[in-house]
Structure formats: structure tokens, C-alpha cells
């Protein structure tokens, strides 16, 4: 399913960060690794349970802000947690030009690259289904999670990477407009639509009215496709709706996010060793403005859960800002020492993803068995979830650091 890649790494202490990074990854972009590391830490950081702490301190704005940004918004809008999946997807696109160039330089033919890409896509889809099935009585065929969404679009992004920049932008525009048009032409739910039948509770205040209602929860084109598509697979019970409103069809605009990352990666390679800061900032600003205009005019709301075209633009703009910020600090200002903990995680993102999804219950159970509960209540019962989460996060990072020091990098 995957391979262990050995890279030359220096046996150095964290104090020798600049020498370590330079020798470990001479052809890697440390800013990209640090950005990816932040994304993975945000995902792994769910164990910190800010929402549980906020409930213990109902009058604390600090904890409520942290809790808000560690959960997905219910429908329209964005919190920091909502940027995990688009950032991960965007960075897959950023890495594509480097990956293709590396393999071509080793004499790999286009055919071999394509076969490897198809294999990688299948593995990502299979891995996503496997992780979604870990607590199920049978295989849970679902295609809306991060890995399967990337896997479904990855081969298309690979093929477009061999096209000229103008063709890539044209493909992005075609994908987003075509997807928007298909949803706009699909019948909107009428005033008598039975939302309760598709898992939308009575009094839910996030549905749109008018033209924007084409993008209401579980009453849209993507929902109709999933009711047909997901019931083609063996299931414990017939699929009726996804409780969070997530959709298989979202892989199409998700591909758009990957293409934005592909463009950023090509700018990084073509301008190297300079950082195309101006391009990043201009692209980010224009994309955010475009996404907001579509949302505010009601043409296409910004909704992450169904990955609307306006969300692709809006979140893509924020990804460009993140990449610009990390590039400026890490590459332009050469402030790499602080980025070391992020780089450790970012260079082993697949391992981090698996650890976060498979190890949490095991680690928590063993911490309680061996240390008891009292040690996590030293600062009061309200902070117990946070202290437990810090212990779990520390173990996650130490495992990844151990892998880093021993030159073990998991790749698909």
C-alpha cells in the first residue's frame, strides 16, 4: 500500500536546526513542509478538546474563540479548523511539480509516471475508506473524507500539470463554472420540502432562501448523486443522507483547490531561489474577493461542507496567504529554528494522519491505566481534557521525531 522512503538526515540536535534541514532535504521547500506541519498539527490538535474546556468556562471569551476555531462551522462561513482540508489539498498541488520533475530527472517515462499516479490515487481512496470503516461492522464505502477526495481528483491534477499555465487556469474556470451551473440547474427545494427526512433538524437556521437555496443542506444535486451512487455498494442500511452534509461529488471543486496549489508550486519552482511573494499575495487577494462577492450576491454561498465553487476560491486565497507567510518567515527571513517542530510533522504527513486517526484511543486508555486520572486534574477539572490532550499530542510528536531522526518517511 505504501513505501518507506529513506532520506539522508543528519544526526543532530534541535539546536542545529538550520544545518539539519539543509542536509536532510536539499531539494525540499522548508516553508511548504512547515505549512503542512501546521495543518497536520491542527488536525491532530482535536485531542486538546477546546470545546470541552469552553463548556467548563462559559464566561471565557478566550476558550470560546479557541473552541470555535477547532470545530467546523455548521454551514456557511469559516473557522480555522475548516482550513485543514483545503490546505492539505492545496499543498498536494504545490508538491506535484516537484514530484514530477524529480521522477522525470531519474529517467521515468510519462507512462510510468501515470501508472504510479493511478496507483497513488487508488491507495488514497482505499486508505480513506479503511479509516472510515475502523468502527463499522463492515466496510463503510464513503468518499467524502480528505484522502478519498484527493484520491478521486489526483490523477486529473497530474495530467493537467503537463499543460501550459493558461490551460490550467482555463481548466479551473471550466470546472468551477460547470459545477456551479449543474447545481444551479438542479431543482431547488421548495417551501414545503421535508428537511427532517434528510437529517436537517427543525429550526436549523442555516438554510438559504431564494436562488442560494440550491446549496442548502442535503437537498441539492450532490445529495441526489450520493443517494444513487453510495447505494450501489453493500451497506448495513440504505444510504439516505450524510449527517454533516458532506458529499462525494465535492471532489470536483476540490480538484480546483489542487490546481491552485499546482499553480503555486510552479511559481515556486520557476522563480527559485526567489519567492514569488507578490504573485502569492495578489492571487490570494483576488481569490478571496471573488469568493466573497459570489457569497454576498447570493450567486454561490461559501460553504466548506459541500465545497462550493466560491469556497474553492475563498479558501484557495487564504491558502496563498498562508504559503506567503510561511515562505516569508522561513525562506526570506531564514527563521527556520522555530519551524523545526512543524517540519518534523510536515515531512511525515501521511504517518501523522494515520497516527491521529488510529492511535488516540489506545494512547488515552494507556495514559489513564498507567498514570491514573488525577495527574490530568492538577490545574482543576475544567482543564483536564486539555492536559490529557497535551500529553497525547506530545506522544504523537515524539513518535514523529523518532521517525525523523531515524530517516523513516512514509510515502504513498
Image (cartoon, rainbow, N blue to C red):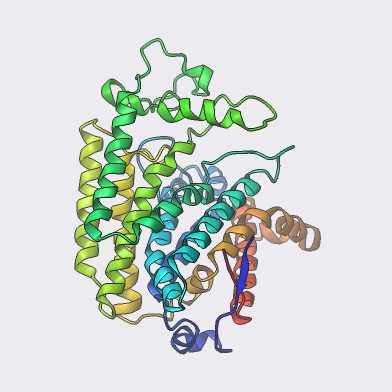
Above or below, comparing residue 218 to residue 353 in the picture: above
Residue 301 visible in the picture: no
Residue at 70% x, 29% y is 236
Is residue 173 depicted above or below 98 in this figure? above
Up-down relation of residue 238 to residue 324 (above or below): above
Which residue is at the far right? 369
Residue occupying image coordinates x 60% and y 64%: 351
Horizontal side of residue 237 vs 214, given as left or right: right
Task: State the image coordinates of residue 324 (x, y, percent, origin top left).
Answer: 29, 66
Query: The N terminus is located in which quarter?
Result: bottom right
**Quadrant containing the C terminus in the rendered view:** bottom right
At 42% across and 73% down in the image, what residue appears? 104
Q: Position of residue 373 (x, y in %)?
A: 74, 56
Q: Position of residue 157 (x, y in %)?
A: 39, 55
Q: How many marks?
A: 0
Find residue 178 and report its image quarter: top left
Amino acid at each position: 500500500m505504501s513505501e518507506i522512503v529513506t532520506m539522508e538526515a543528519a544526526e543532530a540536535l534541535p539546536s542545529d536546526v538550520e544545518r539539519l534541514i539543509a542536509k536532510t532535504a536539499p531539494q525540499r521547500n522548508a516553508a511548504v513542509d512547515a505549512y503542512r506541519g501546521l495543518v497536520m498539527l491542527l488536525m491532530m490538535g482535536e485531542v486538546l478538546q477546546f470545546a470541552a474546556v469552553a463548556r467548563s468556562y462559559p464566561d471565557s471569551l478566550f476558550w470560546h474563540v479557541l473552541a470555535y476555531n477547532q470545530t467546523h462551522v455548521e454551514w456557511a462561513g469559516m473557522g480555522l479548523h475548516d482550513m485543514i482540508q483545503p490546505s492539505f489539498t492545496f499543498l498536494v498541488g504545490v508538491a506535484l511539480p516537484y514530484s514530477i520533475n524529480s521522477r522525470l530527472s531519474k529517467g521515468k517515462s510519462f507512462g510510468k509516471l501515470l501508472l504510479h499516479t493511478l496507483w497513488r490515487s487508488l491507495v488514497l481512496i482505499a486508505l480513506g475508506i479503511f479509516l472510515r470503516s475502523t468502527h463499522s461492522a463492515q466496510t463503510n464505502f464513503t468518499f467524502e473524507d480528505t484522502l478519498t477526495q484527493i484520491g478521486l481528483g489526483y490523477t486529473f491534477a497530474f495530467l493537467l500539470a503537463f499543460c501550459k499555465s493558461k490551460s490550467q487556469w482555463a481548466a479551473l474556470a471550466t470546472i468551477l463554472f460547470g459545477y456551479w451551473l449543474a447545481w444551479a440547474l438542479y431543482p431547488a427545494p421548495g417551501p414545503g420540502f421535508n428537511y427532517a427526512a434528510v437529517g436537517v433538524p427543525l429550526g436549523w437556521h442555516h438554510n438559504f432562501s431564494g436562488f442560494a437555496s440550491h446549496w442548502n443542506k442535503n437537498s441539492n444535486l450532490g445529495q441526489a448523486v450520493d443517494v444513487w451512487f453510495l447505494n450501489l455498494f453493500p451497506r448495513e442500511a440504505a444510504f439516505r443522507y450524510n449527517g454533516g452534509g458532506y458529499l462525494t461529488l465535492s471532489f470536483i471543486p476540490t480538484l480546483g483547490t489542487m490546481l491552485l496549489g499546482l499553480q503555486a508550486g510552479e511559481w515556486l519552482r520557476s522563480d527559485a531561489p526567489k519567492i514569488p511573494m507578490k504573485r502569492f499575495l495578489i492571487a490570494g487577494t483576488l481569490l478571496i474577493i471573488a469568493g466573497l462577492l459570489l457569497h454576498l450576491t447570493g450567486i454561490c454561498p461559501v460553504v466548506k461542507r459541500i465545497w462550493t465553487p466560491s469556497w474553492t476560491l475563498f479558501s484557495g486565497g487564504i491558502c496563498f496567504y498562508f504559503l506567503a507567510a510561511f515562505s516569508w518567515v522561513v525562506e526570506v527571513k531564514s527563521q527556520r529554528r522555530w519551524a523545526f517542530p512543524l517540519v518534523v510533522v510536515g515531512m511525515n504527513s501521511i504517518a501523522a494522519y494515520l497516527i491521529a486517526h488510529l492511535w488516540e484511543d489506545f494512547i488515552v486508555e494507556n495514559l489513564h491505566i498507567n498514570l491514573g486520572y488525577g495527574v490530568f486534574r492538577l490545574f482543576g477539572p475544567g482543564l483536564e481534557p486539555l492536559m490529557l490532550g497535551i500529553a497525547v499530542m506530545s506522544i504523537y510528536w515524539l513518535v514523529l521525531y523518532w521517525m525523523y531522526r531515524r530517516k523513516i518517511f512514509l510515502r504513498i
